[in-house]
Image (cartoon, helix red, strand yellow):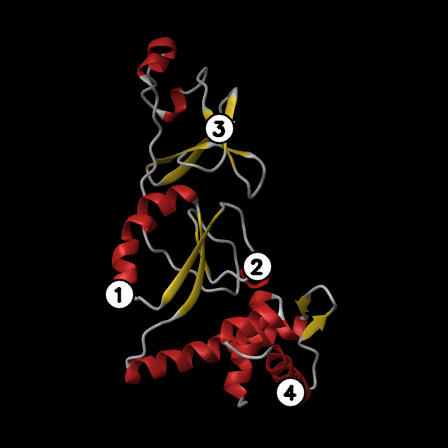
Amino acid sequence: MDRIDSMRVFTRVVERRSFVRAAEDLDLPASTATDAVKQLEARLKVRLLQRTTRQVRVTLDGEAYYRRCLSILADIEEAETAFSGTRPRGLLHVDVHGAQARRFIVPALPQFFSEYPDIELYLSETDRYVDLVGEGIDCVLRSGTPKESDLVSRRIALLREVTVASPDYTARFGMPESWNELEGHRMVGFRSSATGGVLPLEFMVDGVAKSVALPMTLSVGGGDT
């Protein structure tokens, strides 16, 4: 097995946390995957993975090498695809908030599978921060500002947020004309699984973000909130 193939095996082992599952993904014997990583470690003279009977964990050196491998493999894939016309194939794991999946991703799936029939798509649904490497996730779709990270992030859309109230509510509490007239009002809170806390209402006022936390008797999480 050459170095590039060994890198592919290593990155899949890191992502799947298992030699067996990585070998299954790559249609290889588990012994071949194990030998490929051992050869990499011998060549580099570092321990890339910590192995136990229950799990496989990446070391600090392995994490750094994993990120370099991803960059190298991406460049190779891009170069080969540009000249060979090879179509993407294999398992793609995307983690996305449920409301985003239902409104944007699911309706577009027929066209996606028409263009990429060799892709097997696995959609998981959370709104928490995830460990892409540790949990074997290829990409996540999130709203808000991403944390500082070595991972690649791209803005794919700008979505408007609105604050709404039912006619019964405004009949009882009145209709505020501005964000700073919300004193005495109540809200349905959104409880973030990332922090465990309830997010405040947010408004853009002349390009400046304003946050308002109101009292509540109901908080929700996930879904179409």
- Location of residue 35 by image quarter: bottom right
Label 2 crowding class (10 Å Cα cut-off): few <14, some 14-19, many 20+?
A: few
- Location of residue 24 by image quarter: bottom right
Give the secondary structure at mark 1.
helix
**How many angstroms separate mark 3 from mark 4 (CA)?**
53 Å
Above or below 9: residue 137? above
- Location of residue 82 by image quarter: bottom left
Circle 1 residue: 115
Question: Do the residues bearing badges 2 and 3 touch, measured as CB atoms within 8 Å?
Answer: no
Circle 2 residue: 135
Circle 4 residue: 39
Kind of residue sitting beneath label 3: Gly
> Left of 168 or right of it: where is 140?
right
Q: Residue at x 35, y 29 (%)?
A: 163
**How many angstroms separate mark 2 from mark 4 (CA)?**
25 Å
Above or below 192: residue 31? below
Q: Which mark is residue 64?
A: none
Label 3 crowding class (10 Å Cα cut-off): few <14, some 14-19, many 20+?
A: many
Nearer to us of marks 2 and 1 is: 1
Circle 3 residue: 189
The percent position of residue 97, horizontal first and vertical second, equals 44, 45
Give the secondary structure at mark 2.
helix
Judging depth in this view, the residue of 225 and 105 nearest the camera is 105
Q: Which callout, 1 or 3, points at the residue further toward the start of the chain? A: 1
